[in-house]
Each structure stands twice: as structure tokens, then as C-alpha cells.
Image: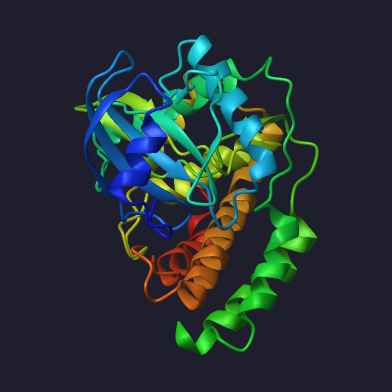
Amino acid sequence: MAVYTQVSAELMARFLDDYQTGELISFKGIAEGVENSNYLVETRGGADGHRFILTLYEKRVDAGDLPFFMALLDHLAARGCRVPRAIANRDGHQIRDLAGRPACLIEFLEGVSLTSPSPVQAHAAGEALAEMHLALEDFTLIRANSMGKAAWHDLAARCDGQWHKIDPALGQLVQSELDWLDAHWPVDLPQSTIHADLFPDNVLMLGDTVTGLIDFYFSCTDARAYDLAVTHSAWCFNGDGTGFDRAVSDALIVGYRSKIALTGEETAALPVLARGAALRFTLSRAYDWINTPPDALVTRKDPMAFARRLQFYADPVHADVFD
């Protein structure tokens, strides 16, 4: 989450007039993340609640993909998954225009995002991820992974000549890993609609209980084991990527497997998929680090935190992580 597009109080109030949300009493920008502009909105007297997230879609989110995301959330909510519903206005529209951007008013879910998850919390997250995959077995819409392997070479090219702004050795690490993954990337794994970005800050919890999965704007059709690998790379290391927590890792995987039995091919592919996940976030963070506008209300994220994860997964010493 972030704020690139500024919205005035007057414009916000006029936007909300088309909803059953009541009177606007406050709103503020949310600085975390890098993809879209987000505001926490509070109202009073409405039929639909009193706290919402307003998202204006920017950068990598294609407006043509928004119906996919809305249908995905509706599908998951109908099957009892804890996800934030998109709120329709009085005319039944979930997607509208605000300040020249596609915008959506989204249900606010209770819970907090973790910075240092415990093994018990990681187990719950693994279960929630698997439950999401099971709920999506009959979801028929398809969306290609816009940040999948096919996009990594393009991202690397866009950073070419600028790696020194991050780390002088990063360019060589990225190129060697691109070459290796091109030669070893697994195919024909079981597919699903996946979250593809299930970091701890996209999982809301109260104590050890998951209360919500949020931010589905990278969701796509891809290998479900890749979703587990992305989640593993996000949950099992400290913030700068220098420390790996084996207890959290084991708990996350056991939690997932308690709901879905991975195939032998998926288990064998996980180390490679994890290297791909670490490279994907190294590249997207590097691009954002280099290209984020200086006046944006946004928290840039260190690409080296995932470059270090990448080096961890590539080290044969750690080959047993997913056993």
C-alpha cells in the first residue's frame, strides 16, 4: 500500500455519496507498500459499516484485470474465506473512477499484520493459504502471472546500468540466477489461482488466528507450489534476509500440508520455486528502488533483503529446507 494520488476531502466525500456508508468523518493515506494508493476511511451512520480501505489502482495494476480481482474476492468470500469484499455503490458498481484512477471501496477487516511471526502463527498462515487454494478449485477465471518468470528478464533489463545504486554485485547475481532458472524451472505442476504476494503484512491476525487475507492484486493462475514458495520466502527470514527461522519454516509447510498433500513433483520443485520467488522480489524491489518518485508517500523496500534469501536458497547446504 502507498499513496501516489492525492484525494481532497471534498472529492472523497462526493465519492462516498454514492455508497451507503454514511457521513465521512476522517481519512488518511497508508504509506506501507509500493503498488497502489490507499486510504483508511472512517464514516458514521452508514448501512455498510464505518471503516473501509479505499484503493486507487496505479502502476502495475491493469484496469482490465480488476473484474478478475473482484470476482476472485467474491468467490472466496462466498466460500467462507476471510477476505475483504469489494463494496458496491448504490448502482451495483464495485469499480469506479476517482481522481483519474480506477478505484474501489473495500471492506475493512479486523486484525494486525505481523513483523516477527511465531511458528504457531506461521502454521495458521500455511493452513489459510491451503484453504484458499481449495476454495479456488472451482474458480474458472484465468489470469496470467504478470510478475512470473517471463517478466523477470524485462525487469532486469530496466535496471541495467543502475545496479550500483543498490549494490555493485547485484547485477551479476541477478544475471546468473536468470540463466540458472531458465534452465531449471519446473513445468507441469498442479495449477491454481494463487495469491502470489502473501507476505506477513497481507495476513491479518488476532493472536494466533488468521482474520483475513488481503491485497490480491498480484493474484493469477500459476503453480500452487509457487504460492507456497513465495509465502515461505516472505515468512521465514528476518527483515533484512540475514536470518532464517527453521521453526517458522517447518510450521508453515506443515500447516499447508495439513490441508493439501503436495505431490512428489511439487516437493522436489520447491527449492527451485523458492529461488524464483526470491529473484522475483529482488527484481521488483530493485525496479521500485530505482524508479519510485521522490515525492510519493511510499515506503521503499530493500532489494538486498531478497537477494540474501536468493543466496540462501541457492546454497546446497540448505537443500533440506523443504523436506
Vertical comparison of 318 with 253: above or below = below
Instruction: Tell me: 60 left or right of 168.
Output: right
Instruction: Tell me: 168 left or right of 294.
Output: right
The residue at the point 72 percent across, 68 percent down is 153
Q: Is residue 168 visible?
A: no
Is residue 74 or residue 159 the one in the foreground? 74
Vertical comparison of 126 with 198: above or below = above
The residue at the point 33 percent across, 65 percent down is 240
Q: Is residue 191 visible?
A: yes
The residue at the point 46 percent across, 41 percent down is 198
The residue at the point 61 percent across, 27 percent down is 262
Instruction: Tell me: 98 left or right of 111.
Output: right
Residue 210: x %, y % from top left: 32, 25
Is residue 4 or residue 46 the one in the foreground? 46
Residue 27: x %, y % from top left: 25, 43
> How is the structure coloured here?
rainbow
Is residue 190 or residue 132 the one in the foreground? 132
Vertical comparison of 222 with 158: above or below = above
Res 224 quadrant in image: top right
Res 151 quadrant in image: bottom right
Is residue 100 or residue 141 the one in the foreground? 100
Residue 288: x %, y % from top left: 50, 69
Residue 148: x %, y % from top left: 68, 52
